[in-house]
Amino acid sequence: MDHYGNSVYLMENLCKGCTNCISRCPTQAIRVRNNKAVITPGRCIDCGECIRICPHHAKKARRDFIDATEKYKYTVALPAPSLCAQFNNLEDINILLTAIKDIGFDDVFEVSAAAEIVSEESRKYIAMHKDEWPLISTACPTVVRLVQVRFPNLCEKLLPLKTPAELAGELARKKAVELTGYKPEEIGIFFLSPCASKVTAVKNPIGAEKSNIDEVLAIKDIYPVLLAAMPKYADAPEELSHSGKIGLSWGVTGGEVGGLLSDSCVAADGIENVIHVLEDLEDDKFSQDLEFIELNACNGGCVGGVMNVENPFAAKAKMQHLRKYLPVAAARSDSYGEYDINWSEKVEYQPVFELADNLKESMEKMARIEELTKEFPGLDCGCCGAPSCKALAEDIVKGVAKKQDCIHVLREYIHKLSEDIAELSESI
């Protein structure tokens, strides 16, 4: 099932057929066939681990580019909180925001400002739904996709509120329409993104039929032009910032939890840690008093996204420095008029791992997979092009691989074949 598409893709001319990526993929979406990696679209959740781990830079993320501004009469940039942490010696966020306007945008609307509103709305929702505790953050699209494909029982625990980026897009378009008189479709909303999963979430929205964002630019693409423009406004930038510590903190792990003003929360980052937390939640290992779980697929939070420039640990330190003199919060929900914070569509389980359309056939295939798995050495070496022996067995049952793809089985096969040839030559 690949109905929601993917941002991560393979550059075949760069791929050397190594197996680094297959062992890191959390949904076993990658295989190596004919000396090239192959990404299964339905299983890929755009976590970016393959981009991060590939030594040959063969994995890339689709995104838009700044020349897309020419399609619109009026454009608004939505900088992610993690953008602020990419620059050295940045003392005033207004310098960065003014530079964003300088490179071709008509206005700027901070995602961190929308994040403070989402924090406010989240506090209300969590307090009103104690029977659903703990609720799971939906700010990271990769985590939502992971729950959809691997943890179907937890779909009902997803916090059904728009992400800060989506809310920022809605508010920015509303403001631009009122200011310019243009039609909504004549206004381009550009999200400056730190990761590939947010590109996918815009092109194929979660919890909504259509995204409020029109284009997604990678932070690493616009970083050089911003760096060149910022010195011009070091002394006299426009006063454009409308967010405080809570909003800016969403760029790092623990920021969303911090905005809830509660001690009964958990925050985890890194895709492997996220999976462990979800497994424990599925097994009821958490206290019933736990209110909320913040999960970020990237190490360090959004500052660890693969479309950033700065090292995530250095970026986190820069974020702490920027927050030092900010107010706790600067954006309030009653300052932006009416808006819709809730999901319009329910997020449901996506059966990408099903082996067949009916239960009987699925059970038969599962039994065959178990039998085949026992025939393999259990080393999960990846030399066959699959991440594990069980994954190879699954591929065989699906008809896309054979036993001899395992080098250990192949060695035994060749050894027996040579013995048969020797016996045949003696008899001749």
Image (cartoon, grey):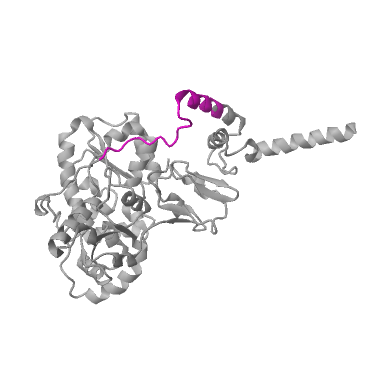
- Residue 244 visible to an observer of this rendering: no
The residue at 15%/49% (across/down) is: 339
Provide the residue span drawn in magenta: 345-369
Whether residue 101 appears in magenta in the rendering, the answer is: no
Question: Which residue extends farthest right?
Answer: 428
Where's the C terminus, which quadrant? top right
Residue 247: x percent and y percent?
A: 20, 54
Across the whole image, how many numbered discs are drawn on residues? 0
Q: Classify residue 259 as left or right of residue 358.
A: left
The residue at 20%/65% (across/down) is: 107
In the image shown, does 11 or 263 lie closer to the viewer?
Answer: 11
Residue 345: x percent and y percent?
A: 26, 40
Answer above or below: position of 264 versus 326. Answer: above
The residue at 30%/57% (across/down) is: 316
In the image shown, does 336 or 70 lie closer to the viewer?
Answer: 70
Whether residue 365 appears in magenta in the rendering, the answer is: yes
Q: Classify residue 363 as left or right of residue 86.
A: right
